[in-house]
Image (cartoon, helix red, strand yellow):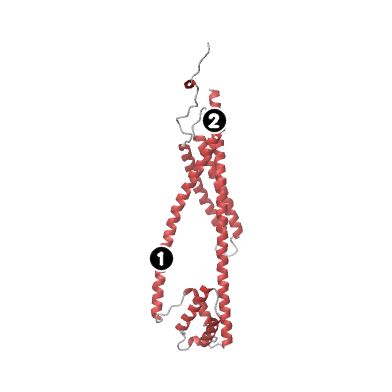
Amino acid sequence: MATVTTAAEVAAPTESASSAVSWGPIIAGAFAASALTFVLMLVGSGLGLTMVSPWSGESVGVTTFAVSTGIWLVLMQWLSSALGGYLTGRLRTRWVGIHTDETFFRDTAHGFLAWALATLLVVFVFSATLSAAVGTGVQAASTVASGAAMGASAGAAANSGDRVSDTTSYFVDTLFRPADPARLAAPGAEGDAAAAAQASRILIASAAAGEVSAEDKAYLGRLVAARTGLSEADATARVDAVLAQIEQAKVTAQETADKARKAGASFALVGALSLIVGAFIAGVAAALGGRQRDDDEDRFLVTR
């Protein structure tokens, strides 16, 4: 007798009522990875402080310190991600009725999610800490700026309202340094504040323009000659020397900024590399932990 099979009797694939994502193991692994990351950061900070010293010749080179920092970042991500991923794989419940490849994928995904959550936790904590530090720094800077403003106001009142920029005060002093130090003891040795302020404004305007015009340079030479008692030729030579110092200071500042830029770019690249390594290690560790959990459970069932 032939069997009639209707469409309703055709076995349809059933969907599991439970989610493939086990958030409990993921959160547990993320917290474990975050805690270990914090501990390793403290250890790294301690080791870093042993490598630097305020005394000349007792600190390691900048390159050595940078390479050591990069290696520690990668190692820190490696260890914390391995712990978090392994715990995530071992703590999840066993999935029944799915293929081995699917189990491997789910374990790997769980390790990646644990790593991502741990990374977000660490970023959140350090962002809050950094924000607090920046707020404290801004408040301190505001206090210092207020004090500086009050001091500048008092100085301006004492000198008939004339102000000289702190940025150029050293160079202005160099311009008007007397050829004979005995002139400092002469009556009125305070100098002509108006001349100093005018020279300061010339230097500031020239710095903004990028160069000192020939007219301004000639005027500075005559002003320095009249103030210091130097010949006009010697005064012009002094102006040229001070302008060269200013240019060298600008070049040094640019070199420092460029080094900071390169250091920041290198740190960002190394940080990104360490995060990629951490994500990979977390997935692999979770897959290993999950496989070991299933194997241990299988051996337990066989021995019963």
Q: Residue 138: x, y in percent?
A: 42, 62
The residue that disc 1 covers is 142
Q: Residue 82: x, y in percent?
A: 55, 42
In the rendered image, the vertical position of residue 285 relative to residue 141, given as above or below: above
Q: Which mark is residue 294?
A: 2
| Label 2, label 1: how far apart the Cα atoms are | 61 Å
Q: Nearer the viewer, residue 160 or 12?
A: 12
Residue 238 visible in the displayed image: yes
Mark 2 or 1 closer to N-term?
1
Residue sitting at x 46%, y 37%: 23
Mark 2 packing: few (<14 Cα in 10 Å), some, or many (20+)?
Answer: some
Q: Residue 57: x, y in percent?
A: 60, 63
Q: Secondary structure at mark 2?
A: helix
Identity of the amino acid at label 1? Ser
Q: Secondary structure at mark 1?
A: helix
**Number of disc labels:** 2
